[in-house]
Amino acid sequence: MAAVIVRIALRYLAGILVARGLLSADEGGTFSADPDIQMLVETGAGVALGAISECWYWLAHRFGWAK
């Protein structure tokens, strides 16, 4: 399921970059369909969400939000 969401997000991002003239149409298609880029985005999102969760846990203990 995550791969589907990432693929859709990459298509929108590629569309925005092509519309702004930062990528050509061929590069945009490659960018949104490349499985290596999709895996990189999925991994990055997982690491970012894990880091946010751990920071929130640390803040909760630091400021006494946890019971």
Image (cartoon, grey):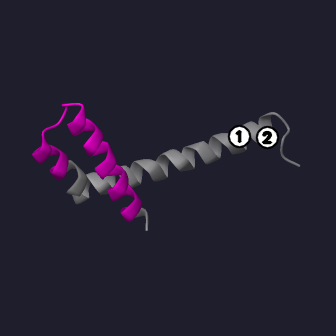
Query: Which residue lies under the disc numbered 2?
Result: 61
Start-end of magenta stretch: 3-30
Query: Residue at the spot x=54%, y=48% of the render?
Result: 49
Residue 58 in the figure: left or right of residue 15: right
In this picture, is 32 found above or below 1? above
Query: Which residue lies under the disc numbered 1?
Result: 58
Three-letter amino acid code at the position of disc 2: His
Is residue 38 one of those drawn in magenta? no
In this picture, is 49 found above or below 17? below
For label 1, the SS is: helix
Depth check, front residue: 27 or 63: 27
Residue 7 in the figure: left or right of residue 5: left
What is the chief secondary structure element of the magenta stretch? helix
Position in image of residue 36 (x %, y %): 24, 55
| Distance of label 1 from label 2 (alpha carbons) | 5 Å
Three-letter amino acid code at the position of disc 1: Trp
Query: Residue at the spot x=41%, y=59% of the render?
Result: 5
Going by the picture, which residue comes out furthest to the bottom? 1
Is residue 13 one of those drawn in magenta? yes
For label 2, the SS is: helix
